[in-house]
Amino acid sequence: MMRLRYINVYLVEQAYGGPEEGGWWYEVGEPVKTMPTRAHYLAKLRTRVGAWCDRMNSTRPPMYSVASTGVYVSVVEDNPARGYPSERPYYE
């Protein structure tokens, strides 16, 4: 039996963590789409989804720009997309 893999698309942006050590930031990923697929379709679908992300990002400011509203990122994972981080990180 072939195992399912997932091509997950996230809208990734920076969130302000706090003023400690001059200010720190962390990445936040909001799930946009999950596409389950079998291994023999994975490469073709990954290419198509990657091209879609590139087109969508072509008019968006880079993620580290002060004008950024996030960028689309596609990732192959073993599970359906879930927002991350699951809990807000704290500076230690």
Image: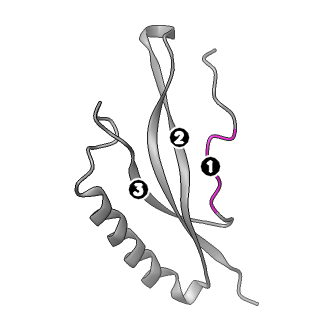
Q: Looking at the picture, how far across and down is residue 55, in whole percent?
A: 28, 65
Q: Is residue 59 left or right of residue 27?
A: left
**Label pair 2/3, CB-CB below 8 angstroms:** no
**Residue 83 image label:** 1
Residue 85 in the magenta stretch? The answer is: yes
What residue sits right under mark 2 in the picture?
28
Which amino acid type is marked by label 2? Val
What residue sits right under mark 3 in the picture?
72
Q: CA distance from mark 2 to mark 3?
A: 12 Å
Crowd rating for badge 2 (residues with CA inside 10 Å; few <14, some 14–19, many 20+) = some
Q: Mark 2 or mark 1: which comes first in sequence?
A: 2
Dot 1 lies on which element? loop
| Region in magenta | 81-86
Q: Looking at the picture, how far across and down is residue 5, in whole percent?
A: 63, 75
**Label pair 2/1, CB-CB below 8 angstroms:** yes
Task: Tell me the residue at 69%/41% (across/down).
Answer: 86
Task: Tell me the residue at 34%/41% (across/down).
Answer: 63
- When asked about the image quadrant of residue 47, the answer is bottom left
Q: Looking at the picture, how far across and down is residue 6, in whole percent?
A: 61, 71
Q: CA distance from mark 3 to mark 1?
A: 13 Å
